[in-house]
Amino acid sequence: MIDKFLADEWHIVEEGFAPETNRFSESIFSLGNEHMGLRGFFEEGYSGDSLQGTYLAGIYYPDKTRVGWWKNGYPEFFAKVVNSTNWIGIDVETEHKKLDLAKCKVKDFKRVLNMKEGKLTRSFVWVESDGKETSFVIERFLSMAENSIACISMTAVPLNYSGTFSFLPYLDGDVSNEDSNYGEKFWEEVNRGMNARHAFLTMKTKKTGFLVTTAMHAKLLVDGKEIEPAKELLARDKYVGYKMEYYVEKGSEIQIQKFVSVCTSRDHEEHVLETVTVDKLVSAYCSGFENLFEAHKREMEKKWEDSDVVIEGDVKAQQGIRYNIFQLHQTYTGKDPRLNIGPKGFTGEKYGGSTYWDTEAFCFPFYLYTDQQVAKNLLYYRYLHLERAKENAAKLGFKGALYPMVTMDGQECHNEWEITFEEIHRNAAISYAIYHYTHYTGDHSYLYEYGIEVLVEISRFWADRVNYHPRKDQYMILGVTGPNEYENNVNNNWYTNTMASWNLGYALVSLDDIKKKDEKRYREVIAKLRLTQDETSKWQDIIRKMYYPYVEELGIFEQNDGYMDKEQILVKDLPQEVLPLNKHWSWDRILRSCFIKQADTLQAIYFFPTRYDVECVKRNFDFYEPRTVHESSLSPSIYSIVASRIGYKEKAYELYLRTARLDLDDYNDDADDGVHLTSMAGTWASIVQGFAGMDVKDDALVLRPSVPDQWEGYAFKITFRGRHFKIEVRKGQVTIGQLSGEDVVVEVFDKQYTSKAGNSIAIAC
Ligand code: BGC
């Protein structure tokens, strides 16, 4: 655990330069705007430990798979978001000495991430060996208003001398992925060009052939006035830059503003790509830094207006939730249904920037409750990949569709047998998101038009993957890995069996529903999918006869067959030094232990809030939580929500803190390779679904709010069936303010109220 940042409601502030935790800080200070993003590495050259990652959404490379022992069914490649042209680079020299924070004395180092405005500022004083001191203030932002544009400003003041300054702004396409399997470089240069005003570089990914043009324009100002310095053009393979030199008097301010535009062939025809990129650059340059920043800030304000969560009485918790919301907006805004949410967003290379079940199982509520269209785009993304999911199932010898564990374009990328072949529960999360969307919004259009095909194909997979056990006359699902990846190749993971059977049931109910409401579409679906009565009868049989492991004497669901045969130890009885287990124990020891990586049985209990009675949930929670090490970032939020539902306030809060500040405090000692983006949405859900107890019953919005003892109160906004709400929860009172839309029923602690636009209902609780 690290305690590095000052507590502040809207800022992440780091004081003092600590090279040993620089990678961690680089992750935390990452910025993005859905189209592109980068880690918080430095503009000037830095020879110390650093992961200089600049990424572009949807630009990937199929890196040839590397495994110790090949298994049939492994994918040929792992698609990775490619580290792309470094566009922030500005080398700095004074009197021929090069600024490099790894090699000089640094004073007053400070990094500030302004989350409200989406701007990163770094300041420090460079102390040279001969005593010369120069102060620096460097700002950067990636425009949320025009997402191909980014701006950097670097201001230097020679504090105790006058001298010649050189700035070397550049674009460097000679970059590689640290996680490249064979040390291969993924880019080749296509074109470069420069004149006295601007420069551009066009690079192409090998194999996938994505073209990316990056263009820059830099201007120099001394004491606020633009000057025309001597400019030397620098160009070599995969690199363009300028050297701009100027003599500066002691105490004067020299500033370089660098404007950047980045466009890709995903969005523009190849033959116009360079023209479009340069045009956007010129227009950005003409607008100027301040105007571009104002437009960006306005977009940020809109984001916060709809999604901010205000916490009173706990600055660290407030900072935590805002950081999570901030990073979610930086990564995915839902404008482009071809994109999705990688577990590390733009903050690192781990997980390759690909899509996991995280999207549907953990991120979905955040988008669904704040912007229905974004949630629909996320569903549509999977529909676009349905044919690939069918190919994936066929490749493994099954009918129907098996969505990949990890994907960029619908094809499976993952190559660990216990996950690729066995973590099949991921399929059900995709169906669950369809259900969740339809149930929450009351909008059946996605289900009828697209979702039903996904549900049927996934059901076909389940029906083929189950094993019928004639002696017991039951269906079983053998050889799986549940969400708890600390146990593999188990039989009858309760979560997987429960979700599979639910999935079949939901497909059947949905088919019936379409038949009743849209007979024509029903016939179309049956014909298109060639769905037979035999198939649906088998689904019913599976639902009736599914086997669920159960521990009679404890009255709990058994995580999987054989779980209770393990030696039962609690996490609290482990010596602190062995945690996290994945860093201290051999894999073999972990697999044989009873310790659980993340919510597994509790994941299904979370998905179905009204299916199990409170006593049953308590028994399962009391048994499984003390055995859970929460070594997946996705775990604490789920447990926190369930704890809130059963009135375990203290526990809910403890787990909330763990999820909200997971990265800022580096709980799992692993944020150096990127923050845990997908778990950040779970943090938001811990407040809205957890503390506020939000759900939907028929057409009513349901709340069962409580306030953690450590807080005075909290407030958030949601969208529900075309209406906007502001919900404020304080100790003893909840206020439901309806901002727009028609009247609707709101249920608070089982009592119903009619809510109207423009009115607030205050209810004692
Ligand atoms: C978790 C998975 C998750 C993946 C990506 C793993 O550590 O166990 O459930 O999908 O990380 O976030």
Image (cartoon, grey):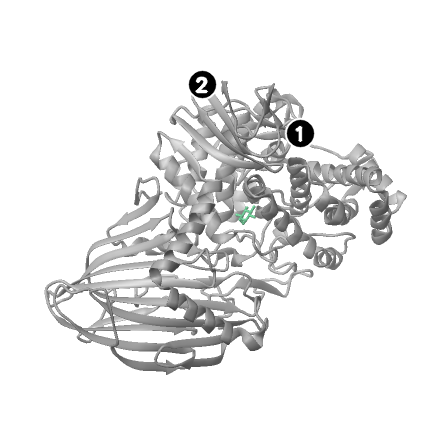
Residue 139 position within the rendered picture, expressed as x and y whole percent measured from the top left: 31, 58
Residue 400 position within the rendered picture, expressed as x and y whole percent measured from the top left: 77, 52
Amino acid type indicated by mark 1: Asp
Inter-mark Cα distance, 2 to 1: 26 Å
Mark 1, residue position: 699
Q: Residue at x 47, y 34 (%)?
A: 716
* Residue at disc 2, CB closer than 8 Å to ligand 1: no
Indicate whether 39 appears above or below 473: below
Q: Describe the element under mark 1 as helix, strand or loop.
A: loop
- Residue 313, image quadrant: top left
Q: Is residue 246 left or right of residue 302?
A: left
Residue 515 position within the rendered picture, expressed as x and y whole percent measured from the top left: 84, 40
Q: Residue at x 69, y 53 (%)?
A: 383
Circle on res. 366:
none
Q: Is residue 486 visible?
A: no
Q: Describe the element under mark 2 as helix, strand or loop.
A: loop
> Which badge, 2 or 1, is on the more N-terminal residue?
1
Amino acid type indicated by mark 2: Gly
Residue 64 position within the rendered picture, expressed as x and y whole percent measured from the top left: 58, 68
Circle on res. 732:
2
